[in-house]
Image: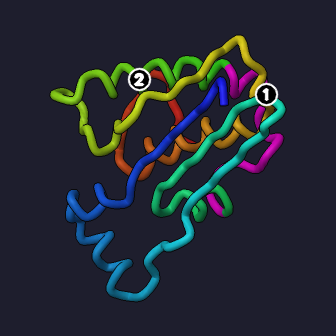
């Protein structure tokens, strides 16, 4: 595929962080096993994959509903947030390399459609809320 968007945050970093919150989920049997969100469209040649414990729960119960934001709003936010995210990927000595694993290839000149922009924006909202990350643009709900 020519233009790929990959967000791969591996569950292994959860264990390396060693938070008690994550251990409690594992011990109660409520661990999240099926927390992969994938959207692909071969005709547009894009793909977004989000592997993040808790993201499905966030999308289905906390995130604003689809169509709450306009596509142009999401595209503008994503353009800035991806730039900020990629900057952090390139500074592993300053930012947690377990959170900022791989750069995101997001071209503002490509129409990825509403679904991809919605999920990408909500990934940044999730990242902000779940891991207390602050971006220059407010992403909290």
Eye-nearest disc, 1 or 2: 2
For the point 79% across and 29% down, the residue is 44
From this view, report whether residue 114 is shown above or below residue 72: below
Secondary structure of the residue carrying tag 2 is: helix
Magenta span of residues? 61-75
Q: x%, y% of residue 1?
A: 66, 31
List the residue tagged with mark 2: 86
Secondary structure of the residue carrying tag 1 is: helix
Instruction: Report, in whole angstroms, how far the alpha carbon at label 1 lies from the one at label 2.
Output: 22 Å
Question: Which numbered tag is attached to residue 9?
Answer: none
From this view, report whether residue 90 is shown above or below residue 126: above
List the residue tagged with mark 1: 71
Taking the image as shown, residue 69 lies to the left or right of residue 22, namely: right
Sequence-wise, the earlier of marks 1 and 2 is 1
In magenta stretch: residue 37: no
In magenta stretch: residue 72: yes
């Amino acid at each position: 595929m020519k233009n790929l968007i990959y967000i791969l945050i591996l569950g292994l970093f959860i264990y390396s962080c060693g938070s008690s919150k994550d251990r409690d989920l594992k011990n109660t049997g409520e661990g999240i096993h099926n927390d992969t969100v994938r959207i692909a469209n071969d005709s547009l040649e894009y793909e977004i994959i989000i592997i993040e414990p808790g993201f499905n729960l966030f999308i289905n119960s906390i995130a604003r509903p689809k169509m709450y934001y306009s596509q142009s709003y999401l595209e503008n936010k994503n353009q800035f947030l991806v730039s900020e995210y990629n900057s952090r990927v390139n500074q592993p000595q300053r930012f947690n390399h377990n959170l900022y694993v791989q750069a995101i290839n997001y071209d503002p000149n490509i129409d990825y459609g509403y679904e991809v922009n919605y999920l990408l924006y909500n990934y940044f909202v999730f990242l902000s809320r779940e891991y207390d990350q602050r971006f220059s643009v407010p992403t909290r709900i």
